[in-house]
Image: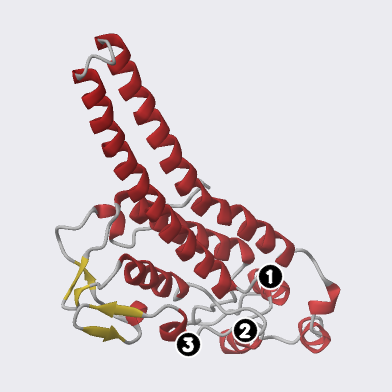
Amino acid sequence: MKKSNIEYYKEVVKRAENARNTINQANADFERDCVLTKNAYEADLYGERGYKQRLEELEAERDLRIESGLSRILAVVDEYDAEMQRLGELDGNKIDDGTMKLLNSGMSLSSADWQQLADKHADNAIMSKILKERYGENKPKEEKPIVVHFGQSPESRSEVFSKFTRTIYNAARLGACPSLSGGGRLKTVRDYYNYLAQSSLEDMCPFEGEDFSNLDADFPVETVSGKIENAGGRSTSFSPGDPADFNFNFTPVRKA
């Protein structure tokens, strides 16, 4: 990958902050220019029609700046999707010969055996795909088989990242920084974005050398009363009055 998974999340957070700054500046410039335009109108420098036309132009300019800033957030999804597509491409170098010999031996495997193999290759997208397909063809005939959990596919990772990015997009668009029920008010909007990043990354399965164990350092979250450790792992939710966009029912950027 060109960038690590953590770096992609940090890029979204950075672009969201930049977008929020752009929105604030665009709104401030719009309000200032509206006042100047009104003063010019009252000084008879604009006629009624010219005055209304100028206000429409100012509004269009503001909206264009806002849309341009927000669109940069969603652009990261395209880059990430391309990375996941490459990651999911068949690569014989990522196939474990020992495991393949075992699968081709004809040996009967229990659900526990399948789970052991799934855990062994959880960070390998290719082997996880092979194991999942073989398991579907050779499910153990057990009275009470356990549910086997295989490694995450690149497509699933793309969906998780897409949902996270859309939620950050909505937060930046609305300027949301809600309180945490039981956890106090977040100190800054950046803390909110980091909170969302930690929560989303909990749905990610580390791939091939990735390490998600230091999220508090990568995405620190602080309330006005102090730092929150393992923010994403807490059952803390947002206050009831917060917009429905921010209850972690993520909306994908694209519909399946």
- Say whether marks 1 and 3 touch (CB < 8 Å): no
Closer to us: 16 or 103: 16
Image coordinates for residue 67, horizontal then vertical, percent: 44, 41
Image coordinates for residue 61, horizontal then vertical, percent: 42, 32
User: In terms of sequence position, does the residue under pointer 2 or pointer 1 come before the other?
Assistant: 2
Mark 3 secondary-structure assignment? loop
Q: Label 1 vs label 3: CA separation? A: 28 Å
Closer to us: 150 or 153: 153
Image coordinates for residue 87, horizontal then vertical, percent: 71, 67
Dot 3 surroundings within 10 Å: few (below 14), some, or many (20 or more)?
A: few
Left or right? Give the position of 239 relative to 244: left
The amino acid on which the numbered mark 2 sits, given as a three-letter code, is: Trp
Q: Label 2 vs label 3: CA separation? A: 30 Å
User: In terms of sequence position, does the residue under pointer 1 or pointer 3 come before the other?
Assistant: 1
Please give the name of the residue rendered at 41% of the width and 60% of the height, measured from the top-left corner. Answer: 17
Left or right? Give the position of 102 relative to 175: right
Q: Which mark is residue 129?
A: 1
Please give the name of the residue rendered at 49% of the width and 82% of the height, measured from the top-left corner. Answer: 146
Mark 1 secondary-structure assignment? helix
Q: Which mark is residue 214?
A: 3
Closer to us: 207 or 149: 207
